Image (cartoon, rainbow, N blue to C red):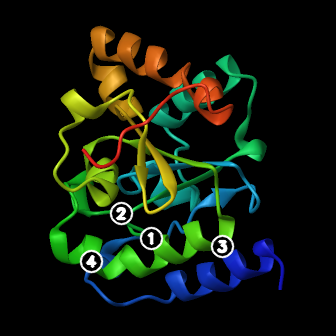
Amino acid sequence: MNNKEKLEKLAKQISNCTKCSLCEKATQAVPGHGNPNAEIVFIGEAPGFYEDRDGLPFVGRSGKLLDFMLGQIGLNREDVWIGNIIKHRPPDNRDPLPEEISACKPYLTKQIEIISPKIVVTLGRFSMNYFLPNATISMSHGKPYLVDNLIIFPIYHPAAGLRSSSLKLQLIQDFLKIPDIMKGEQLWTSQA
């Protein structure tokens, strides 16, 4: 099986998942989407209203900002893979609970293993803490870290940028570092 087929098989498992109660109220699972051979993977927190409706990650206002930033570094959605740590929408877009993150963890681990990217860009504190459990987003954003042979690059969530112009500026500045990190021109630290 190639990567696309492996991800599709895993997406079917995710769609049928009942490991936590999120599946009961969500319209559908949002396994992730994009290039199965991507060098860059973006990981957010959880699907929101529009993602739950469409079955695709980052299709609302945050997704439009993400698309804009991708364009700023010469990429589009077909070049990258985008997913979330949680695969079903939490009610009222509340924060994911530890047991929900734990239930979805094997899926994201397998997705990253299949894609085998050069860099994982975490969007917001929940996805950052998935890889860097003791880090704080205010201290760790914009700095690449080497974790289990993966480059983890935490940045603010696009939704935070939509709520604050200063965070939006910081988000874009951090995002513009991605090409240099991909070229190996940015040094990284070990764990935060």
Indicate the quadrant containing the N terminus: top left, top right, bottom left or bottom right: bottom right
Q: Is residue 79 above or below residue 132?
A: above
Q: Nearer the viewer, mark 1 or mark 2?
A: 2
Residue that label 4 marks: 102
* Alpha-carbon span between mark 1 and mark 3: 26 Å
Where's residue 84, x and y in %?
A: 44, 58
Q: Is residue 26 left or right of residue 31?
A: left
Foreground tag (4 vs 1): 4
The residue carrying mark 1 is 27
Image position of 183 (left or right of 143) = right
Q: Distance from label 4 to label 2 (Cα)?
A: 15 Å
Distance, label 2 to label 3, CA atoms, is 24 Å
Q: Give, as a three-letter code, the residue at label 2.
A: Arg
Q: Is residue 27 left or right of residue 54?
A: left
Mark with earlier residue (4, 2): 2
- Please provide percent x and percent y for residue 57: 54, 52
Residue situated in front as seen by the camera: 2 or 62: 2
Element type at mark 4: helix
Contact between labelled residues 2 and 1, with CB atoms less than 8 Å apart = yes
Callout 3: SS:
helix
Would you call the spot at circle 2 few (<14 residues within 10 Å), some (14-19), or many (20 or more)? many
**3D distance between C-alphas at marks 1 and 2:** 8 Å
| Kind of residue at badge 3 | Ile
Q: Is residue 174 above or below residue 61?
A: above
Please tell me which of labels 1 and 2 falls first in the chain. Answer: 1
Cα separation between marks 4 and 3: 19 Å
The residue at which mark 2 appears reads as: 89
